[in-house]
Image: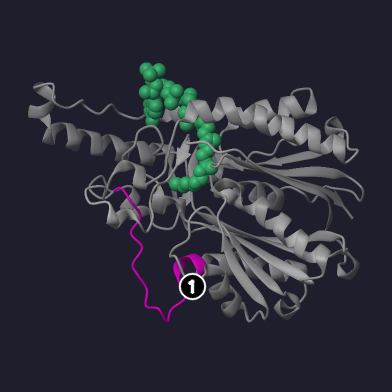
Amino acid sequence: MHAAVIAATGLFTPAERVTNAELVEAYNAFVEIHNTRHAAEIAAGEMEALAPSSVEFIEKASGIKSRYVMNRSGVVDPEVMHPLIPERSNDDLSVMAEIGVAAAKDAISRWGKDASQIDAVVCAASNMQRAYPAMAIEIQQALGIEGFGFDMNVACSSATFGIKTAADYIATGSARAVLVVNPEITSGHLNFRDRDSHFIFGDVATAVIVERADQASGGWDILGTRLKTVFSNNIRNNFGFLNRTAPGSEGAADKLFVQEGRKVFREVVPMVSEMIVTHAADLGLDPAALKRLWLHQANINMNDLIGRRVLGRDPTPEENVIILDEFANTSSAGSIIAFHRSHEDFASGETGLICSFGAGYSAGTVFVRKR
Ligand code: CO8
């Protein structure tokens, strides 16, 4: 069995950005149009008038202030309310592969080795652009990597599930190094007409290179990885290839992201806190001694609570890194952005935790130690 390290990470950030104020302005313009168009039905009590969104609510309920998006003009146009991303020819790199490749190139350049030393590519994300061929194989081809690649989807936990998969391949000798890529175009499956969730997500791509410890210089020892899933209907997206076989279901709200946010909050916080504390104990680690938590970035209040339960005190902003204010929830990429952005001050031997949680429910813990 071979030990594995996180050798490098990479980040791609879209060029376009939408602030809460811009998003709310677009949403409220859509509400005006909708309520005017349906004034007769609303007056007759056949339809409820839509209520406006507010910047204050979004910041207080979630901590999100802005998000990056692949296309801004469609998202902020009240007559469109979704990103506009033209279809590409099969001979061109698809847009998801493109952002995955950009993040991967960033990781590979920080790694300082050649892509030829990577033996496998895992594309781990919430939604794939298409059913097949796998995004991972397209990314593999674009980077000139030999070996194999495949896609996996464990929603917001995809990155930690991908890291564990990679570490297991390293352990068994299936690969010398594995590239895990997390391209998230969440704006494509977010319902910007839904007041409860229109502000939640943002687009980004991250990449992680997991390598055999005895071949790596520097990086982070992976001390332990653990995964957990418990079925829940509280976060769903029913978009799928069988939709067309159920006439009348086209365009229904559940074919985009839907959730019971309060229930998710209440159920996931204890599940994840307990998982972290138990996994730390099993590894002989004192959770209170962790230098940093790089948690999934869905909601600032959730992260505050998990941080408090894990550390046994109020974590400082340095201990519990928050990037969701700038990026919003980027699904699988959130904890990796936090790690990527905030690790330079670690001394050799110091420990931290990468942890994700989300739909499924699913959760993953990856304890790391600076080499
Ligand atoms: N503006 C103003 N008021 C609003 C708005 C709004 N936009 N939205 C709701 N309100 C009102 C409600 O109507 C309600 O009013 P009232 O009290 O009069 O009924 C009040 O505000 C409170 O509403 P909520 O109870 O819904 O608000 P919360 O305080 O619970 O906050 C959150 C809502 C922010 C959604 C919060 O519950 C949350 O973040 N929960 C955790 C969610 C989470 O972590 N989800 C994980 C999802 S990620 C995942 O795994 C899926 C991956 C797939 C990616 C998909 C990409 C698209």
x and y percent of residue 117 in the render? 76, 77
Magenta span contains residue 279: no
Quarter of the rendered structure image containing ligand 1: top left
Q: Is residue 95 above or below residue 40?
A: below
Residue 293's spot in the image, x, y percent?
Answer: 74, 39
Image coloring type? one colour
Residue in the picture at 73% in, 47% down: 342
Question: Is the shortest distance between ligand 1 and the CB of mark 1 under 8 Å?
Answer: no
Whether residue 63 can be seen here? no
Measured as percent of width and height from the top left, residue 354 is found at 72, 45
* Residue 31 in the figure: left or right of residue 210: left
Tell me the kind of residue under disc 1. Answer: Pro
- The reply, left or right, for residue 193 in relation to residue 370 is left
Q: Is the residue 32 above or below the residue 149 in the image?
A: above
Could you tell me what secondary structure mostly forms the magenta stretch? Answer: loop
Q: Is residue 93 magenta?
A: yes
Task: List the residue tagged with mark 1.
Answer: 133
- Which quarter of the picture shows residue 7? bottom right
> x, y percentage for residue 43?
10, 22
Q: Is residue 319 above or below residue 172?
A: above
Name the one closer to the observer, 28 or 178. Answer: 178
Magenta-colored span: 81-97
In the picture, the quarter occupied by the C terminus is bottom right
Q: Relative to the observer, which residue lies in front, 173 or 5? A: 173
Count of marks, rendered view: 1
Asked whether residue 339 is in view, the answer is: yes
- In the image, taking residue 239 as reference, residue 305 lies left or right, namely right
Name the residue located 92 percent from the left edge and 48 percent from the top edge. 349
Secondary element type, mark 1: loop
Q: Quadrant of the N terminus?
A: bottom right
